[in-house]
Amino acid sequence: MKRIYGFVDFINRYSKKYLLLKLLLFVFFYRILYFFLYPRKIFYNSDSVSYFIPIDIFHGKIDLYRTPVYPYLIKFFEYISGDYFIKSIIIFQQALSFLSIIPFYFVLKQNVKNRIIIILSVLFYGCFPLIINQNININPENLCIVSSVVLMYFISAYIRKPTKIYAFFICILPLFLIMLKPVYLIVLFICCLFILSKFFVRNERQTAIWGVLGIVISIAGVWGYCEMNRKYNNEFTLSKITMNNAFLNVIMSGAYESGGDEKFIAIIKENINGGVYMPMLIINKEWADMYKASYRLFPQNLPPTWDMNFNISANGMVDYPLDRINNFIHQSQFSKTYFLYMTKQIVKMFIYNQILLLIQIFELLLIIIYFIKYRKILWFLLFCVLFIAGQYFTIALGSMNDWPRLFLPSVPFIILLFAIFLQQALLIFDKNRFNQMLINQR
């Protein structure tokens, strides 16, 4: 035990000065060594291709399936870097990911008082292969992870010192996040609840008004984008990608055999061996044409992956209207096969994340008990729990077959939640310090 306490004392004394700088240097050299020892090619797939769709929202070119932030980022780097724009995107993503360590560190410092836990959490965030690999992925997941850290920082900063600028950014940021990826739609609802609840805190009402202004702008922005989709694509929706995901679930579950449309069933059976996307691209010519338009803008020096080859070969041989496709999906979804498949996938997700789920339940109970006993809310802890729960909810409604990727925006919140829980576990038998820790997290 003396050796353990001696080690802890050594870490505390050694890391006290310039801790952030030391951590940044360690992560920097670790990442260089990581890619040097295990060189990786740029990650991309058929999803990556779809972000190269020709869009110009100011002139009516709006993609019905992809929100515009990442496609515009691609266009920006293509404009300034020419043929080297893919490398520029990768460097940009690497830099953003590295710099996000700084706000992540300060959030930990504000909410966790154990220096060893802070060090381990920052190193885990900075060195975790799942996060690092997204930096060389031509997909918006890297920006999603970084954006979650930024949101986390503003929430934590506002709770520590409520200001108008923090309140405004907390509520305007969801608009950017939703335009980055529709999976963030639930975050707008959570931020709305958070800032509206501040009207019940007497000394925060003036700052909360600025948050309401941000919420109004965000809602207006989402509504306006849906309206543009209605005007140019005849669909009042943020994105039709949920229909694609539902179709994928129908195909993968085998529930398509209950869809009641014999032509659809025959096409799916005949082409399912070409990949789950193949029947979708064959059934609707618009999807096939959009994919080919995106592929023409995709860098030709990057060889196509197997799923890209399958999608390119789809000819859109039949062009069924979306209403007919929707009816087919809805009828398939009401089948016993679909219900059992989705239930099994959801249970799998929860079993895979059972430790996280147990920690969330524990933290939620702690929040409730603390509120009942002291009539105070652990705001930051509650936001973290709701954010992760919101991701469960959106994934359950969306693409269950790809839930690990869709869960990536929650990774920073998960690491932070584990750090808070670990600190609580260490102080559980020290009532005074435990209560002081909860006060710090309010």
Image (tube, rainbow, N blue to C red):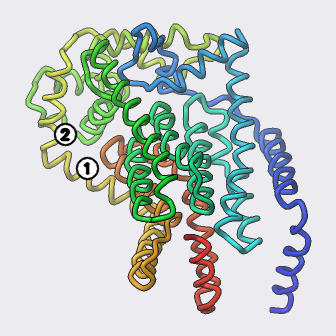
Residue in the foreground of this view, choosing between 182 and 175: 175
Q: Position of residue 22 (x, y in %)?
A: 87, 56
* Residue 3 position by quadrant: bottom right
Label 2, secondary structure: give it: helix
Q: Position of residue 156 (x, y in %)?
A: 60, 58
Q: In the displayed orientation, state which residue is furthest to the left.
A: 260
Indicate which disc residue 255 carries.
2
Please, is residue 233 above or below residue 35 in the view? above
Q: Residue at x 45, y 65 (%)?
A: 201
Residue in the foreground of this view, choosing between 295 and 428: 428
Q: Quadrant of the C terminus?
A: bottom right
Residue in the foreground of this view, choosing between 2 and 437: 437
Label 1, secondary structure: give it: helix
Q: Which residue is mark 1?
A: 341
Please, is residue 407 above or below residue 113 in the view? above
Please, is residue 13 above or below residue 201 in the view? below
The amino acid at mark 2 is Ala
